[in-house]
Image (cartoon, helix red, strand yellow):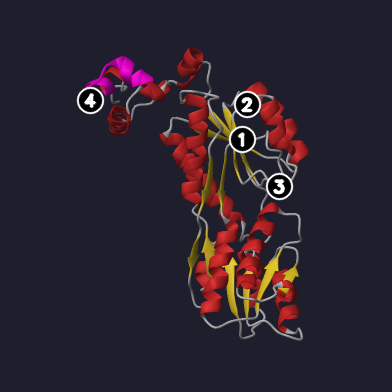
Amino acid sequence: MADKVTIADVARRAKVSRQTVSNVLNSPELVREETRQRVREAVKALGYRASQAARQMRTGRSRLIAVRVEPAQEDGINGSVFDRFLHGLTESAALAGYRVLLYTAGDHDAELATFDDLLGVYEPDAFVLTSTDYGDPRTAWLWGQRIPFVTFGRPWGAPPELAYPWVDVDGAAGTAMATRHLLDAGHRHIGFLGWPAGSGVGDDRRAGWARTLAAEGIDPAEFDHTTADGVPEGEAAAHALLDAARPVTALVCVSDSLALGALRTGRRIAVVGFDDTPVARAVGLASVSQPLAEAAAACVDLLARQLDGPGDGDGPPAQVLLEPALVRRLSA
């Protein structure tokens, strides 16, 4: 069996002191970026594994970031979005010296109860919250308890004093790109298949489509259709817009599930989805792609600033709004 790699081995390879290695692992803000990178390369090359128990006793920190596993999606389409985000979060957390602690909860009330259990048993250092919505009670609870957190999703309707760190993707920019692409292709009757009003994400995506049409002098009201998410729902909604007095010739959809339903009509129509899921890629569906790995890395970075960075509490916490990209395929 090979000898266990020690912190002294890492120090020799990186040509730094053992204290510097310890600082990189436990208090990286104390070390210059160039030195941090050299130590991390040595850690990776040697396969060094710090004792988590010893580190926790020394620092009073668990190095755990807790995040909820989203409920399974019945159609198996939209769930891949969170899977990709979670994969990126796990990788980014590991690079920053953290591990991801997964938990489940059926709704916000159950999640609040789970917070107490997790904090009592595992003592996570911070939380990443997903699926934010209007009046989200989780952010207010964590803020009140002074527990570090970041959300993947904006603070829809939150009061200004609740200025917590968040990362999000600009959904309105994504649907605006899709709508502009269809306008440039000659379409004027461009419909929108969206979720009922009241969803922060859904309302944001609808707004980008509506503003882009209005800027062209087109009233979006008659081309707007709301429905629950799902492939059958998308098919029915698309038929309704195709059979209207002024039928649409193209559709921008709030999700790939609704877009795939629109394709199932078999009618001649251009369709753009949202999320660029594996199913969209397989069937040639044009879709708006979210930079999920970048979003996950930004979440970890904002948490690391709270947990490891200097000047804690100085100035407002950072917020990151990322641009999506339109992936053009045969459907549009």
Camera-near label (3 vs 4) is 3
SS at circle 3: loop
| Of residues 4 and 323, the one drawn nearer to the viewer in this rendering | 323
Q: Earlier in the sequence, mark 3 or mark 1?
A: 3
The picture places residue 127, in percent across and down from the top left corner, at: 60, 33
The stretch of residues the image draws in magenta is 10-23
Few, some or many residues within 10 Å of mark 1 (<14, 14–19, 20+): many
The three-letter amino acid code for the residue at tag 3 is Asp
The three-letter amino acid code for the residue at tag 4 is Arg
Q: Which residue is mark 1?
A: 164
Camera-near label (2 vs 4) is 2
CA gap between label 3 and label 2 equals: 20 Å
Few, some or many residues within 10 Å of mark 4 (<14, 14–19, 20+): some
| Of residues 163 and 18, the one drawn nearer to the viewer in this rendering | 163
**Residue at horizontal 42%, vertical 21%?**
27
Whether label 3 touches label 1, CB < 8 Å? no
